[in-house]
Image (spheres, helix red, strand yellow):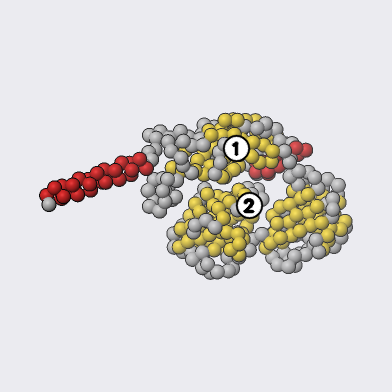
Amino acid sequence: MKNKIFLYLAFIGLMASLLSCEDEADKVYMLDNPIPPSIQTMPELTLERDNGSDTLEFIGTPVDPGFQASARYFLEAAAAGTNFEDPVQVYSGIKAESIKMTVSDLNTILVKKFPADETSTVEFRLRANLVVDAGTGAPGTGTNPFEYISEAKTADVTIYGLPRLDLLNSGVDQKIESPLGDGNYSGFVKLDAAMPFTLLNPDTDTEYGGSGGTLVVDGAGIAVDENGWYKLSADINNLTYEAEPFMIGVVGDATPNGWGAPDLKMDYDPETGTWVLTTDLADGYIKFRMNDDWGWNLGGTEDDLFKDGPDIPVSAGNYTIILTLTGDASGTFEMIKNN
């Protein structure tokens, strides 16, 4: 009997040793000094309207923590010598090796920060947020990610101003622009259902009105069904237009209406290309959505908003909320507590 017990205990010890070795083999270790991402090459950045549809490519390397890991990358630009105190986000995504965009897309982003038709000295950097776990709040988790930043690359950047159509009789000085200079204009505008508007091309002194999606030279004012923000597009080559409601709102149990409509509507600032709202919030959670509908909604963290992302926690107070859209369904935001 003693021999059987001894053999049994020895077998248990052997299995424990094997399992321990297997667990040890499965572990991953972070380098003491993870290698940050880098920008290896940058494209020519003398931007011209005639080349607006050309593709630009920034080539980088990903962060290397010593093991295979997922990270989110942010390509940022700032005026040289400012230490990125007020950067503009050029790209947000999961790839660092090849970041592509069109000339017109980059110009549209940079013209909000730098003067048009001039050459500016601009610094670019690639920032990585690395998450190795989630849910605990410890370093490396979704709420407290590790951050690694590349060395800055400096370039002389020339951006171009955009052809425009001015809105007349809309109650506000506003315009829509043509990134490619090809007769196709678009932009965010605030419209009043009681104030039909026309579009003036200041380069040719041509005025357009219309209805039902058709533009007419010297036509009647264009009307919309309800007050609010719209994404207005106009094609003066084919004499067509489209006005789509584009009302970004804040929703959540921290808002007066909870998770139901109507949301707290934000205003667009064309000078900064951001959506802004000052409001009182209670303890709770918020998200951003469009037109009081969940088909398009953003959640996440201040520097990483994405479609259907998690709810955003807030504490009670009066806030100014600044939302920057960086793609069709991505962005960043800032919350400034006023009291």
Q: Position of residue 230 (x, y in %)?
A: 70, 59
Looking at the image, the residue that sits furthest to the left is 2
> Which is more N-terminal, label 1 or label 2?
1
Q: Secondary structure at mark 1?
A: strand
Q: Nearer the viewer, mark 2 or mark 1?
A: 1
Residue 327's label in the rendered image is none
Residue 198: give x, y in percent of width and height: 81, 58
Residue 98's mark?
1
At 41% across and 48% down in the image, what residue appears?
Answer: 133
Where residue 245 sits, quadrant-wise, is bottom right
242 or 310: nearer the eye?
A: 310
Question: How many discs appear?
Answer: 2
Who's the residue at 74% across and 60% down the image?
243
Name the amino acid type tagged 1: Ser
Residue 317 in view here? no
Q: On screen, 309 above or below 79? A: below
Instruction: Quadrant for residue 154, please give it.
Output: top right
Neighbours of disc 1 within 10 Å: few (<14), some (14-19), many (20+): few
Amino acid beneath label 2: Asp
Q: What residue is rendered at 51% in x and 60% in y? A: 286
Return the x and y of residue 205 as percentages of the image width and height.
Answer: 86, 49
- For the residue carrying disc 2, how many other residues have a C-alpha within 10 Å: few (<14), some (14-19), or many (20+)? few
| Residue plotted at (65% across, 43% down) | 109
Which disc number belongs to residue 328? 2
Q: CA distance from mark 2 to mark 1?
A: 19 Å
Q: Answer left or right for 28 relative to 97.
A: left
Q: Inspect this view and state whether residue 224 appears.
A: yes
Drawn side of residue 90 relative to residue 166, left or right: left
* Residue in the foreground of this view, choosing between 84 and 215: 215
For residue 146, side relative to residue 113 (left or right): left
In the depicted structure, whether residue 300 falls above or below residue 53: below
